[in-house]
Image (tube, rainbow, N blue to C red):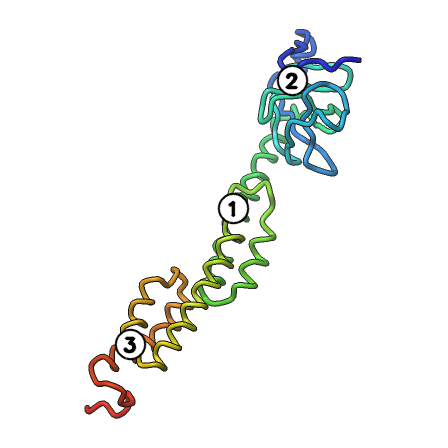
């Protein structure tokens, strides 16, 4: 049987439409994401997107166990993997739960950033990986998973280069490297003694800092 074009909408009857009025239809898939398909048929090559469990959908049509939706991804979804909530109290509770998830995501990301800034990259990464996909900060967290290790490696490499430069009495090079340090508190604090020594050497030569006249 030919697939129904995505643009064709099977309108709900007035009776069916009434069943969705004032109600909230959400994804209820035990194995998310829920596939959104180009037509009301289960084929491997007609998936146009996916929706996470608990996300709300906008229903505009229905056909033989399928719901046509306009948001968040236009297409068709299996009705059996959705749930329509009409009770206002239950809707409010769901909204509250969603807000709590957002708050948790923000708190975990903040904790991860503090761990990172304090010098514990591994703990930061572990924390970020616990942020759920339905969190409002999930996308930001995924970016952090990529940028944090890269910035950390760069800071560590610059620190090693600065140590070598100091041993070779290249104080000016040490001071130049400071400008390239990523904004990581742990590594900036590690650099501080090297910078102090470099400044000292620029003024007093190779003499040990403790020999500086008081």
Residue 49, compared with residue 206, is above or below; it is: above
Nearer the observer, disc 3 or disc 1?
3
Separation of marks 3 and 1 at Cα, in angstroms: 47 Å
Q: Quadrant of residue 51?
A: top right
Residues under numbered marks 2 and 1 in contact, where contact means CB atoms less than 8 Å apart: no
Q: Which of the two discs, 2 and 1, labels the residue nearer the N terminus?
A: 2
Q: Residue at x 21, y 85 (%)?
A: 204
- Spot occupied by residue 171 in the image (x, y as percentages of width and height): 29, 76
Q: Residues within 10 Å of mark 1 (few under 14, many from 20)?
A: some
At numbered mark 3, what does the secondary structure look like: helix, strand or loop?
helix
Cα distance, mark 2 to mark 1?
30 Å
Say the numbered circle drawn on residue 171: 3
Q: Quadrant of the C terminus?
A: bottom left
The circle on residue 80 is none
Q: Residue at x 70, y 15 (%)?
A: 62
In the displayed structure, 93 sits above or below 45; it is: below
Q: Which residue is mark 2?
A: 20
- Label 2 Cα crowd, 10 Å radius (few <14 / some 14-19 / many 20+): some
Residue 63 in the image: state x and y as whole percent: 74, 14
Secondary structure, mark 2, is helix
The image's mark for residue 103 is 1
Residue 194 or residue 70, whichever sits in front: 194
Cα distance between the residues tagged 3 and 2? 72 Å
| Camera-nearest residue between 161 and 210 | 161
**Vertical placement of 188 versus 8: above or below?**
below
Residue at (69% x, 24% y) in the render: 37
Quarter of the image where the N terminus is located: top right
Seen in the image, is 109 located left or right of residue 52?
left
Decide: marks 3, 2 in contact (CB < 8 A)?
no
Residue furthest out toward the top: 14
């Amino acid at each position: 049987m030919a697939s129904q074009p995505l643009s064709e909408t099977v309108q709900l009857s007035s009776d069916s439409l009434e069943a969705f009025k004032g109600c909230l239809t959400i994804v209820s898939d035990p194995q998310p994401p829920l596939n959104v398909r180009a037509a009301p048929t289960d084929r491997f090559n007609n998936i146009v997107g996916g929706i996470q469990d608990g996300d709300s959908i906008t229903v505009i049509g229905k056909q033989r166990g399928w719901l046509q939706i306009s948001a968040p991804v236009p297409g068709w979804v299996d009705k059996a993997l959705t749930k329509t909530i009409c009770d206002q109290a239950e809707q409010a509770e769901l909204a509250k739960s969603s807000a709590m998830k957002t708050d948790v995501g923000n708190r975990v990301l903040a904790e991860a950033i503090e761990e990172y800034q304090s010098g514990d990259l591994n703990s930061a990464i572990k924390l970020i990986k616990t942020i759920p996909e339905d969190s409002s900060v999930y996308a930001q967290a995924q970016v952090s998973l990529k940028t944090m290790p890269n910035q950390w490696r760069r800071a560590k490499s610059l620190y090693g280069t600065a140590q070598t430069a100091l041993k070779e009495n290249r104080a000016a090079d040490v001071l130049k490297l400071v400008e390239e340090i990523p904004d990581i508190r742990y590594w900036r604090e590690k650099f501080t003694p090297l910078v102090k020594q470099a400044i000292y050497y620029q003024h007093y030569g190779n003499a040990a800092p403790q020999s500086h006249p008081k």
